[in-house]
Image (cartoon, grey):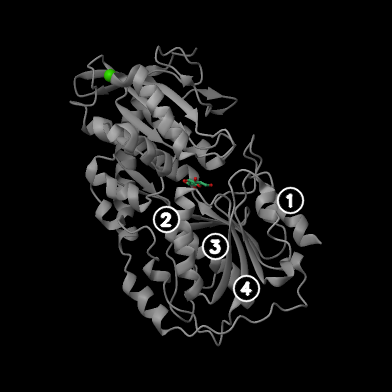
Amino acid sequence: MNKKGMLSIATAVVLGLGAAGCGSNSSAPAASTKADTAATEAASASTQAEAAAPSGDVANKDKPLTWFNRQPSNSSTGELDKDALNYNANTYYVGFDANQGAELQGQMVADYIQANADTIDRNGDGIIGYVLAIGDIGHNDSIARTRGVRKALGTAVEKDGAIDSQPVGTNVDGTATDVQDAELKVGDKTFKVRELASQEMKNSAGATWDAATAGNAIGTWSSSFGDQIDIVVSNNDGMGMSMFNAWSKDKKVPTFGYDANSDAVAAIADGYGGTISQHADVQAYLTLRTLRNALDGVDIDTGIGTADEAGNVLTDDVYRYDADARSYYALNVAVTADNYQDFTDATKTYAPVSNQLDASKHPTKKVWLDIYNAADNFLSATYQPLLQNYDDLLNLDVDYIGGDGQTESNITNRLGNPSQYDAFAINMVKTDNAAAYTSLLNQ
Ligand code: BGC
Ligand code: CA
């Protein structure tokens, strides 16, 4: 086990604090300028045209396709699936910047420790103990978040040139090899920081990011070493809120998640430590906007980096485009006690892109869209409601298919007749499984 270099890691943690603190503050106002008035006015002014029959002359394999939320990639190595991302000339991915968000999340927790050093060590043993709920060990967003937290807290160890993201199981004695104890100096105090436990929250049926499993895990952990847990961290709010409600709210143990779901943001008033907005309002827009542009045969940047005729446009503080990966990434914003009032409704459209498109110029088209797991908190409580707000604004008639989170066939079985649709938006169960969908479009 590598305990060397503890000091330098601790120093890096301290140095990193200032920089990320500025970043999170400066990006907060952009996300807080949401206004629902524009959306409401635009929606009421809209006259939806009848869905035109899909044009029979476009082969399914040439129809617009946008992957979202789970980037086609190898679930063991993280390597992007370039075939899937370049399936046809109108294929894109929409997600968020996983590394930038992961860094923000880690920093948010580290900032909290610094600011609360007087009270954070609940049992006074000199160790700041945290537990970590991991969503899906084969999902690159989950991997990035685990790495971001370990890096910011100094508990990360390198393996094959990257930060080890494996769960440790329990590590109450600090002997695990996938993490190390960090040393943290705050003022004249020196603490150890230890990852007491971490686990992939996968239920017996195979569903990952499983909130109920996380609720059970905190029950098990707290009953055997509860007084040592000073902080709870989760790869997402679904699991984080489950742990908060099951244990940490009562015990007043700060709990940190990711996604800025409305219930998690509201819980900040009750002691939830904080969360990260992955700007789902921008992602949901991009998911449908990329399809709309392809269907209209206009430049893909229309209504994105370049204003459309209705005035919809995004600024580069909320997203970036990686042409090589054909991927749009929304940027993340930390949501804490300082700014959570600006994030209370996660389903509100983003004002700068909430203008109704003219149905005579952008006639209604039919879209098939699936959510890999209808029970996923983020996708069902935040992302899909946003999509449903944008589909009207963009004149898209979307069929929403909810999967079981476990088997791809549960979803692909419901793509029996792709010829009925003009475009597709796909959220896979497993990031390796793009071909299960494209093979249906190839027929
Ligand atoms: C979200 C998780 C969600 C997952 C589903 C992530 O981006 O943060 O909450 O479970 O997507 O793929
Ligand atoms: Ca302690």
Indicate which label's residue lies in the foreground, 4 or 3: 4
Q: Nearer the viewer, residue 362 or 85?
A: 362
Residue 287 is tagged as 3
Q: Earlier in the sequence, mark 4 or mark 1?
A: 4
What amino acid type should be assigned to the residue bearing mark 3? Thr
Instruction: Point out residue 5 in the picture as x, y percentages from the top left corner.
Output: 42, 17
Q: How far apart are marks 2 and 1 (CA)?
A: 28 Å
**Ligand 1 within 8 angstroms of badge 4 C-beta:** no
Q: How far apart are marks 4 and 3 (CA)?
A: 14 Å
Q: Which of 140 and 206 is in front in this view?
A: 206
Element class at badge 1: helix
Instruction: Evaluate if marks 2 and 1 touch, with contact meaning CB atoms under 8 Å apart.
Output: no
Residue ID for mark 1: 435
Residue ID for mark 2: 279
Residue found 45% across the figure and 50% down from its top:
378
Q: Distance between the residues labelled 3 and 2?
A: 12 Å
Residue found 38% across the figure and 42% down from its top:
104
What amino acid type should be assigned to the residue bearing mark 4? Lys
Residue 366 is tagged as 4
Element class at badge 4: strand
What amino acid type should be assigned to the residue bearing mark 1? Ala
Mark 4, residues whose alpha carbon is within 10 Å: few (<14), some, or many (≥20)? some
The reply to whether residue 83 is in sight is no
